Image (tube, rainbow, N blue to C red):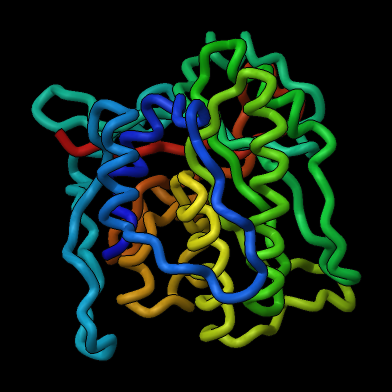
């Protein structure tokens, strides 16, 4: 049983599940089994509404599993003021938001909210591409608190350079430690997403890991996030996400990066489309990543 996209989507609307949580031990060994069905039920109790969710549970025979088909009719996707809007029968079934890191410098979150952002993904930190050390994003706490104070629901992501499952679990534990710190200051965090990308740096240690290892690392990270009561998600471009098998793409909701097009081209289901990394938003002093989060009534 995977974490349903409906659960992640509900969490996106109301991210107050930091209260009363008892974190599980962040083991770096084998992750203890936790009923994902129980997690889905618990997460559903703390949030309302429903975002994108489609597909069936993965078969035990991975070779026979097919992708959840992309559920959207792109004839219903329009562009309004340079932003994609998914509208069905005059009902808007999408929301617009941003994701930021220290590369965006100091953000005026009140201005971002006034510009219409309804969610924000804030980078927690990263693992170094060559030496593999872990670090917190310079603006993580400032961005998380600023978005929260501006009334924008806060989600997070960690930039991974893990080369094996042990490092992925270490990254998840490190990410959660920072999330717990910011939640202690009153910020509610919903999703903790896994972002593993190749980097254009000589000596990058994780650029050429096999697809099977990429998938195993993503799963290891997401399992730790999930067992600690947060909603996981996997970010990537089409090439990244195709390194997962259809069965693996069903396990956790996906955040697709695909730029320079009028509509996504992938055939599988996903929750969020990052449609540009060159967006201009009042309150953000540099170009920014812009996203649309699809809903199903």
Residue lying at 82% horizontally and 57% vertically, measured from the top left: 134
Q: How many numbered discs?
A: 0
Side (left or right) of 76 relative to 195: left
Residue lying at 32% horizontally and 60% vertically, measured from the top left: 35
Q: Position of residue 204 (x, y in %)?
A: 82, 74
Q: Is residue 170 above or below residue 143?
A: below
Q: Which quadrant does the N terminus fall into?
A: bottom left
Q: Which quadrant does the C terminus fall into?
A: top left
Q: Quadrant of residue 281?
A: top right
Q: Position of residue 143 (x, y in %)?
A: 70, 26
Would residue 82 be seen by someone viewing this image from the given angle? no
Q: Is residue 256 above or below residue 198?
A: above
**Along the viewing direction, whichever of 74 and 211 lies nearer the viewer:** 211
Q: Quadrant of residue 77?
A: top left
Side (left or right) of 146 relative to 66: right
**Along the viewing direction, whichever of 98 and 79 lies nearer the viewer:** 98
Side (left or right) of 280 relative to 59: right
Would residue 292 be seen by someone viewing this image from the given angle? yes
Residue lying at 47% horizontally and 52% vertically, measured from the top left: 232
Residue lying at 79% horizontally and 31% vertically, measured from the top left: 139
């Amino acid at each position: 049983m995977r974490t349903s996209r409906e659960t992640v989507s509900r969490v996106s609307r109301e991210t107050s599940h930091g209260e009363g949580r008892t974190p599980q031990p962040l083991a770096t060994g084998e992750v203890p089994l936790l009923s994902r069905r129980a997690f889905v039920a618990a997460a559903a109790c703390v949030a309302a509404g429903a975002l994108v969710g489609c597909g069936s549970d993965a078969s035990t025979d991975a070779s026979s599993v097919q992708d959840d088909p992309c559920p959207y009719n792109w004839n219903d996707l329009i562009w309004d003021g340079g932003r994609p809007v998914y509208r069905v029968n005059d009902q808007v079934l999408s929301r617009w938001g941003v994701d930021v890191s220290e590369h965006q410098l100091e953000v005026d979150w009140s201005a971002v909210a006034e510009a219409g952002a309804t969610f924000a993904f804030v980078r927690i930190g990263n693992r170094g591409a060559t030496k593999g050390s872990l670090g917190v994003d310079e603006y993580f706490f400032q961005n998380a608190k600023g978005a929260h104070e501006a009334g924008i629901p806060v989600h997070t992501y960690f930039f991974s350079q893990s080369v094996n499952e042990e490092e992925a679990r270490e990254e998840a534990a490190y990410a959660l430690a920072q999330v717990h710190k910011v939640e202690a200051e009153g910020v509610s965090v919903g999703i903790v997403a896994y972002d593993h990308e190749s980097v254009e740096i000589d000596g990058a240690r994780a650029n050429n890991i096999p697809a099977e290892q990429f998938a195993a690392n993503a799963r290891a990270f997401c399992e730790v996030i999930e067992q600690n009561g947060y909603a996981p998600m996997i970010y990537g471009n089409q090439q990244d996400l195709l390194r997962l098998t259809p069965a693996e793409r069903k396990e956790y909701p996906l955040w697709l990066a695909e730029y320079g097009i009028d509509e996504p081209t992938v055939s599988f289901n996903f929750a969020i489309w990052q449609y540009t990394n060159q967006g201009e938003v009042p309150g953000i002093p540099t170009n920014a990543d812009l996203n649309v989060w699809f809903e199903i009534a």
